[in-house]
Amino acid sequence: MRSHFPSSRIGIVVSTLGYELLRHCPFIDDAFIYDKQGGSAGMVAYFSIIHSVRKWRPDCIVQLKRFRRNGIIGLLSGARFRCGFRTDGSAPFLTHSLPYREDVHVYTQNIQLLSLLGITECSEVRSELHLTETELSEARKWLNEQGIVREFSVAHFGGVTSGAAFLSLSARASVLKELNHDGYSVLIGSGDSEQRDATSLASMVPNSLVACNLPLRRTMAVMYFSSLFIGTNSGPMHIAAALGKNGVAFFNGDEKFRNDIKKWRPQFDGLKIIPVTPASADLDLIRQVNIALKRA
C-alpha cells in the first residue's frame, strides 16, 4: 500500500497486543487502540473509537475482520470506499468485497484484498517484524543475565487456535532433549496455564529457562537471537516465521488438520509442519523432527 500510495497516510485499528507487534513499522502513520475485550470494553469506548477514526477522515477502509462491530466502525468512519470480505454472499457495510474462503491462507486472502484497491503486483510481499537496536541490545543483555551464553532454541506450546493439549508433556520433553544436546531451551508463553506447563517441562529438560509472560517486544527480541523454534500452531510460531527461524511446528492431526494447514501454516519454508495424532509415539515424533530439520 505504501509503495502504491506513497503520499497517503495509513492508519490501523488494533488491539494493544496488535500495536505492540506492529510498533516501529515504518509504513504505519497512526494507530487507534481498541481492545473490545479489555480496556476498551463497553459502548462508551466503542463510540470513542468510532469518533477517533471518523475525525481522522479516511478516504478508504480495508477491513481484515468480518465482525459486525468492525463493519459499523468502517461504515461510520465516513470513508466512501470500504472493502473487505463477504460471508455467505453478504457484506452489508462494504462497498467492495471478496468472498472469504476457509481453504485459503489468511495471509493470502488479506493480500488479495489489495486487488480491490487496484494493487495487483504483490510478488515480493513478505512478513516483517521491526525491532530496534535498543530492543535487541536489551534482549541480549537479559539473556546474558539469565546465563544463556551458548546457542539456544525457543519453545512455545500453547496458542488460541488449537492449544497444545494434543502434544503430551513427555513428547515435548523428548523433542527438546533430542534437539538441545549442548544448548539451552528458552520456554516462552503467556498466562498462568502456559507458565505452569512451561515450569513442569523445565523440570524434565536440562538447561531450560522459563521465560513466560515477558513483554511481547522482549519475547520477539529474544526469539531474534535464537537458532531454532519448536512449538505448536500459535502466534509465536508466526513470529518465528517472520524472523526467518528454522524449526518445527506441531499441528493437531485431527479431522481439521488439512484445513488448519491451509489457513494457518507458517509463511516460512524453514519452519516445518508435523501433525500429531493420539497414535503418535515420542520416538516417532523425534524421527519426524530430525527428518524435517534436515530439509529446513
Image (cartoon, helix red, strand yellow):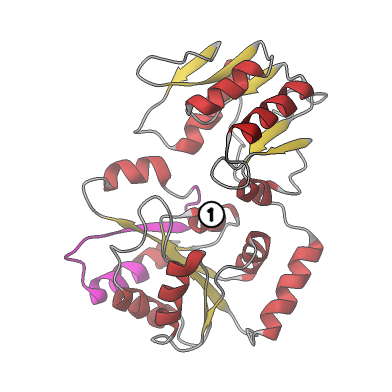
Q: Write the residue at 76% across / 71% down.
A: 138
In this picture, residue 124 sits left or right of residue 241: right
What kind of element bears circle 1? Answer: helix
In this picture, residue 290 sits left or right of residue 234: left
Find residue 50 and report its horizontal and vertical position in percent: 67, 26
Task: Say which amino acid is labelled 1.
Answer: Ala
Find residue 134 and report its horizontal and vertical position in percent: 81, 65
Q: Quadrant of the N terminus?
A: top right
Tell me: residue 87, above or below residue 192: above
> Which of the two residues, 37 or 199, is positioned nearer the viewer here?
37
Q: Write the residue at 28% across / 62% down.
A: 166
Tell me: residue 184, above or below residue 216: below
Find residue 172 and report its horizontal and vertical position in percent: 35, 74
Question: Which of the 4 image quadrants contains residue 276?
Answer: bottom left
Question: Which of the 4 image quadrants contains residue 124?
Answer: top right
Tell me: residue 140, above or below residue 107: below
Q: Write the residue at 72% across / 16% down.
A: 59
Q: Which residues are magenta?
A: 267-290
Instruction: Using the rendered image of the protein, determine whether residue 94 is visible from the camera's viewpoint.
Output: yes
Which residue is labeled 1 in the image? 241
Tell me: residue 209, above or below residue 231: below
Q: Quadrant of the C terminus?
A: bottom left
Please tell me whether residue 113 belongs to the stretch shown in magenta. no
> Which of the two residues, 247 or 141, is positioned nearer the viewer here?
141
Categorize mark 1 by other alpha carbons within 10 Å: few (<14), some (14-19), many (20+).
many
